Each structure stands twice: as C-alpha cells, then as structure tokens.
C-alpha cells in the first residue's frame, strides 16, 4: 500500500494523496451520512394544536423502470401524506411536494428521518398552507438510483418526473400544474432534486436542495473498492460488501451502464489510463456543477429555489458553489448554512423551513401567474 511509504514520496504527491483521501471521506459521508438503517435525527417538539394528516401507503408502477438490468422492482412503494382538510373538503384541490430520500434508505426510513407525519402536521399548525406531501421509494440493488436515467438501474429520473407525478395527479385532488408542484431532496435526494429540477422545469415550479451530494466531478474510487468488486461473482455476495463498494457500484450503475457486462452491467474506472479516463468522464458529465450551465433557461423558470446545508457537513463547499453559480447567471436562490451536520436537523429543517418555503412559493389556486 502506498500509504505505508508516503513519507518517502515528494511533498506534492503527499499533498495530492491527502486531498484525495479527504475527497473520498467527503464522498463516503455524502453517500452514507444517513446510511445506517437506524440513523437518529433530532425530533422537534410536538406543536400544540396540530391536526393529524392521513398517511397512505401505495404502490406506483414505474413504466420508466421496465426492463432494467438490475432487476429492480418496477412497482414502487410510495408514501402519501394528505392534509387535515383533505377528507373534509371534497371539492378542494392541493399543491404537491415531492420529497426524495438519500442513499441507502428508502421512503419509510426517510419518513422517520424527517419525523413525518409529525413535522408535516407541525408545519401546518405553525402556519404553512396545506399541501400533499409524497415520498417515493427509489432504493435499488446497490441502495441508490442516483435518480438518474440508466438501463442498468431503470430510468428513475423519468420515474419521478413523469410516472409518479402522473399517478398522483390521476388519483388525488391535486392542482395539476408545474406552479403547484415542488421538488425537494436530501443528500442523494438533493442531487436528484438538482438533476431532475434542472431537466424538468416543465413539471416543477419550486425547488429545494437539502445538503445535496455529488455536485462536483469525482476522482476514481479507492483501489481496495475496485479490487473487492472484481472478486464478487454473484449478487448474494453484495450484502457482505462495505459502503464504498456499494456506493461505487451505485454510481457506475447510474452513470456508466454497460449491458454487455454481467452480473452488474457497469463500466468501472479500471484498466489502462484511457479506460479509466473514459469512465470518469461519464461520471463527471453527471455532476450538476458540470452541467448546470446547460439548463439556465430551465432554472430561470422556477418561482423560487432554495439550498441549505449544515456548517459541519462536508457538502457545504459544493452546495455554496452551486448557489454562487446560480447567482452568476442571475438566478435568484436562497442559501443557508445552518448549525448542524449532515442529518441531525432534518426534522427541524423539514418542518420549519422546507414546507414553509413551499407554502410561500407554490400556487394554491386553480389559476396562477405563469
């Protein structure tokens, strides 16, 4: 291992290795900041007078996911939170907020991390206007779809922007216009909200990114992870693999799919220098800080965009960079670096900031200003 001999290397090489180690640590944290199935987040106190919402657990068929090479389920679990007045006012229609979970968790665990339904009820009691909140599950074989478009994972980008939205509009009393739809996500979900938001401004009208991961291009994963992947001969062995192996496969499945390479149908940054560079170039092309300039026209369509991140979160630098890039293009957005880490304040943020943001910026009428 190189690390055993680092003191004999030139200072420039040592600095590069330290930078790479730091980058990998940040990447691991961005993927796994909420990786534990039992991650604990601070729970806000119950708001006095909060009225109960109705929770429905449904399945939505993902036509966009059909034929995916990983064998990921095409009928996906979705949590729908209906506001207190939904059953009492049968003629009333509501805006919808679509909330995307992070890596390694699904919709159920995401609900626990944001302490829903309590925080949704609390937000309404604190003055947020009533809306429908939808949590779709996008967990895959490798624990995360990256909300990307890939025949290996399935087209989760279109699944969210088309399949889920169309189903909710068809089965619930929504206001079926982009001005009445909000998109929010945390960590990998924040990446998904950035990616989908930039590409599908015809579907959503307001956008909120919570500690978004994976905004900038990344270097190759550690050699140990690549060596471990090379030894895997069956999907059953996956469960024994550590986080970086699973995250590497998740990224490759989303961004460098290859239908001729079973069992995982991915290209990895291995082989000669040119082969590695080609795969990493594909990964870099999927970094929002790389492709944001292509979607300025779409981003200018949004009524409001917000970004937030904890001051003890390794993702704060890239989140601030994206905010700055939006400013450079004259796109209005708000940015807050709050006192917290990657996950601990999720409940407070969702109740006191996210839903208030959408209350202030979504259209709550049948006819809205375009």
Image (cartoon, rainbow, N blue to C red):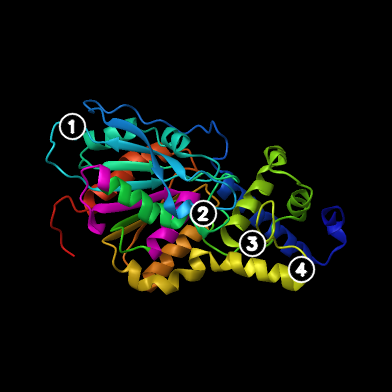
In the rendered image, residue 194, in percent from the top left (x then y), is placed at 43, 59
Regarding residue 11, the answer to whether it shows in the image is yes
Task: Report crowding for label 1: few under 14, some 14 to 19, many 20 or more residues within 10 A (C-alpha).
Answer: few
Instruction: Find disc 3 in the rendering and name its residue.
Output: 258
Instruction: Find disc 2 in the rendering and name its residue.
Output: 154
In the rendered image, residue 137, in percent from the top left (x then y), is placed at 45, 42
- State the CA–CA distance, disc 4 to disc 1: 65 Å
Q: Is residue 303 magenta?
A: no
Horizontally, residue 129 falls left or right of residue 202, namely left
Q: Earlier in the sequence, mark 4 or mark 3?
A: 4
- State the CA–CA distance, disc 3 to disc 2: 13 Å
Circles 3, 1 touching at the beta carbon (< 8 Å): no
Residue located 41% across and 45% down the image: 61
Task: Report crowding for label 4: few under 14, some 14 to 19, many 20 or more residues within 10 A (C-alpha).
Answer: few
- State the CA–CA distance, disc 1 to disc 2: 35 Å
Q: Earlier in the sequence, mark 4 or mark 2?
A: 4
Instruction: Find disc 4 in the rendering and name its residue.
Output: 12
Q: Which residues are magenta?
A: 170-199
Q: SS at mark 4?
A: helix
Pair 3/1: label in front: 3
């Amino acid at each position: 291992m190189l690390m055993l001999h680092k003191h004999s290397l030139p200072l420039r090489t040592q600095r590069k290795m330290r930078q790479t180690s730091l980058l990998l640590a940040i990447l691991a944290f961005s993927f796994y900041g909420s990786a534990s199935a039992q991650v604990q987040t601070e729970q806000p106190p119950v708001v006095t007078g909060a009225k109960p919402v109705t929770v429905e657990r449904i399945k939505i068929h993902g036509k966009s996911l059909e034929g995916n090479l990983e064998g990921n389920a095409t009928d996906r679990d979705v949590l729908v939170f209906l506001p207190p007045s939904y059953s009492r006012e049968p003629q009333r229609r509501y805006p919808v907020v679509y909330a995307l979970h992070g890596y390694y968790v699904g919709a159920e665990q995401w609900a626990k991390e944001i302490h829903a339904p309590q925080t949704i009820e609390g937000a309404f009691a604190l003055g947020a206007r009533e809306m429908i909140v939808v949590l779709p599950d996008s967990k895959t074989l490798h624990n995360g779809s990256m909300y990307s478009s890939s025949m290996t994972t399935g087209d989760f980008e279109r699944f969210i922007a088309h399949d889920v939205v169309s189903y909710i509009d068809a089965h619930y009393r929504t206001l079926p216009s982009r001005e009445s739809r909000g998109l929010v996500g945390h960590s990998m979900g924040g990446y998904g909200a950035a990616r989908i938001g930039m590409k599908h401004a015809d579907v959503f009208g307001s956008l909120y990114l919570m500690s978004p991961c994976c905004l900038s291009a990344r270097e190759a994963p550690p050699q140990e992870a690549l060596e471990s992947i090379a030894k895997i001969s069956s999907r059953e062995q996956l469960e024994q693999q550590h986080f970086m192996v699973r995250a590497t496969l998740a990224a490759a499945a989303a961004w460098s799919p290859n239908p001729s390479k079973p069992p995982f149908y991915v290209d990895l940054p291995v082989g000669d220098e040119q082969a590695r560079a080609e795969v990493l170039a594909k990964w870099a092309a999927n970094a929002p800080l790389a492709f944001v300039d292509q979607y300025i026209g779409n981003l200018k369509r949004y009524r409001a965009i917000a970004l937030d991140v904890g001051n003890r979160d390794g993702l704060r630098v890239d989140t601030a960079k994206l905010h700055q890039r939006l400013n450079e293009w004259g796109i209005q957005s708000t940015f807050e670096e709050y006192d917290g880490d990657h996950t601990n304040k999720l409940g407070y943020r969702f109740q006191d900031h996210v839903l208030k943001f959408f209350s202030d910026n979504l259209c709550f009428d049948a006819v809205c200003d375009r």
